[in-house]
Amino acid sequence: IAGTADLARAGAAPAITDVAANDAAVILYTSGTTADPKGVVLTHANLDAERLAAFAIVTVNETDAILGVLPLFHALAQMANLLLPLSVGARVVFLSPVSSTTLLEALDTRGITIFACVPQFFYLIHQRATAEVAKRGRLARRLVRAIVGANVWLRDHAGANPGKRVFARVHRVFGTKMRFLVTGGSKFDPAIGRDLYGMGFTLLNAYGLTETSGAATLMRPGDRFTTSVGQPLPGVEIKIAERTTPDAADDGEILIRGPVIMREYFGRADATAESIKDGWLYTGDLGRLDAEGRLYITGRSKEIIVLASGKNLYPEEIEAHYRQSPFIKELCVLGLSRPGEPAAERLHAVVVPDEQVLRERGIVNVRELIRFELEGLSVQLPPHKRILSYDIWLEPLPRTTTGKLKRPEIERRVRERATDAPADARPLTDAERQWMAEPDHARLMAVVGARLDRAALPPDANLELDLGLDSMERVELLTALERHCSTRVTPETRATIFTLRALIDAVLAAAPDADAAGPADEAGSQPWEAVLRQPPDPALVANLDRGKSARAMFAFVVLGVAGLAMRGLLRFRTSGQEHLPRTGPFIISPNHQAYLDGFVIAAALPYRALRDVFLVGAAEYFATPFTAWLARLANIVPVDPDANLVTAMQAGAAGLRMKKMLVLFPEGERSIDGELKTFRKGAAILSSHLDAPIVPVALDGLYDLWPRGRPFNWRGLLPWRGTPVRVQFGAPITVARGDYAGGTQTLRNAVEKMLSDMRSQT
């Protein structure tokens, strides 16, 4: 710079250096998903070839405005956000700092016409859109799915795109002048890509490496939707190397040749010779080409998971399937070998829950929810592609600056955490020590330590993931602290408590409540007695004690219709009704196999019992006016047990005090394989404190008719198939005061024995 200034003062023009086409223009280092980043030497000819090829497909001129959010040390950013737009005089908007707030503001106010970004941003937009739809209920979700599917068909077959108008609100996120979106850097989730296409977005998927000066392939504007990354740029050749493994028919390593290929790796002749052979760049990526020349990315050759059976799996394909859950924000699938069998890998996942969604829905049972979601999605895959074990992390997964998962680092952390000390053994942080120094905090932490029989608990320990407390145990701990402080935490606050610190802060900040005072019984019975003594919202259970004639008629209709349907379509058999008490209160506790279980129980009950039966059902199923009316008629109290366990238990207690009969599924969820799962102790708690016996019920046959995670098996209704469905009621069980564990085990043993006896008689 000083030399140029000196020349200017002397009146001489600065010298312009002549460069040859093959001279180095820039050296960009690879992002380094491994520990060996290399400097990629791109020449002036490389950059010019990329410019000419890109402009042969997309039109960019001085009227365009490009939003740049990627670091300029990436090839995609160098080309899409700097060299290409400036070469035609287009305007480029750079953000500082880059955040979701500044990004959305720029899209709204800067007249952006072209936006190139890694897939994660588009995932965020898709997530926000689907979350907004989810709030409107199941019917709205189905309607949106139907509209998206219809618009995909219209775009592919009729050239029409009404999605821009139908989903105008989502399109406004990108501004009113957006022409097209470009994505690259990592594989795009095909399900999300289809949804965005169905919403009317023109998303041009690209594929390339730093070694190819940026993009080597690009989808053409106006092309139909595929899961491909488009066709090669003009002047670029792509072929697929032959595979030697027998289970990868059309897949192979992607080889690229053309003027966009780098000159060399800086100072690494050995690495250059290994990557470029006979002019072909060996990318290390796996893929296939279709008949029209579109490239489909399968995965990375170095990331293939080899199972003990010899099957090769691509983790990105499996990750895309499991990311369908709205509760999973990030997921990484690894192949972990067993001790002594380094060549045989099993599928292990690291799951990062979406904390925002969990908080919005008031869900604190994170581990139970993630297990349920993974199980439900696993049954849709062949056995060798199913996740067999998993960890839950609350921090984001490590990624490169282009958004690619750093799989080696993730695997290293997984192995390190497997040998880490438990949460109550790790040293306290400075922030935790400072918080503990407050007398009130220290006093309640001592109560927690005594109750859990653990010393030196860290305040930031997660109640579920670190301390292993289930939903019932968390309620017991919270209630013990409430009684200690004579306060009452509101239901809304309970749904936001995840850590010990949050638990204690909530108890200390809660309003005083004289009814909460009293010594906390260390055995655990006193907290539940205090919880169940508190009545729920009167409006929630008012329906249980009115409209008896309407419910009686409803019970008669349900009994008649359900009974006829069951007996007409299935080989429906019931036994043991003589064990049902003549009057309430009592609890009916069947195992849970399918959505139809409630109807089957209704068909099996005598009329005298059915008219006084009530259930505490998940609120999400009764959100519409019609389903809410149906819930009132059918004696269903709509409460979400995951978010409001205390309210659900109090509603159950209120109904039992009215001498009603409560149907409570002790597994809490439908079985994933038709077999019994862990029984929760809710029934035993209610029975213990309300003096209500439990009638165990064994139900079998419905799993084959409607297995969890799979569609209804209509063939099971055919007359000649006659799916056998059987219901057996057992002798009532009484639970001693406070003996929750013993009562729960007795209940499970009774159901298990009846189920085994029924199956042995088949």
Image (cartoon, rainbow, N blue to C red):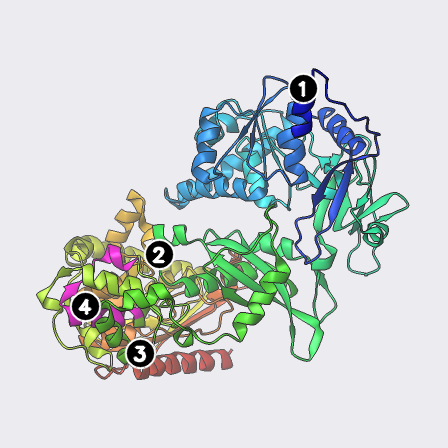
User: Could you tell me residue 637's position as x and y percent?
Assistant: 25, 57
**What is the CA distance from the residue labelled 4 to the residue labelled 1?**
79 Å
Q: Is residue 212 above or below residue 749?
A: above
Task: Decide which of tag 4 and tag 3 comes sooner along the chain.
Answer: 3
Task: Decide which of tag 4 and tag 2 comes sooner along the chain.
Answer: 4
Structural crowding at the residue carrying mark 3, measured as other residues with C-alpha within 10 Å and reported as few (<14), some (14–19) or many (≥20): some
Q: Main secondary structure of the magenta part?
A: helix
Q: Which mark is residue 8?
A: 1
Amino acid carrying mark 2 in the image? Val
- Magenta range is 474-495
Q: Is residue 511 above or below residue 748?
A: above
The label nearer to you, 2 versus 3, is: 3
User: Could you tell me residue 710's position as x and y percent?
Assistant: 53, 57
Q: Which mark is residue 554?
A: none
Q: Is residue 599 visible?
A: yes
Residue picked out by circle 4 = 482
Is residue 591 covered in magenta? no
Image side of residue 650 versus residue 703, left or right? left
User: Could you tell me residue 550's position as x and y percent?
Assistant: 20, 52
Is residue 480 covered in magenta? yes
Q: Nearer the viewer, residue 663 or 132?
A: 132
Task: Decide which of tag 1 and tag 3 comes sooner along the chain.
Answer: 1
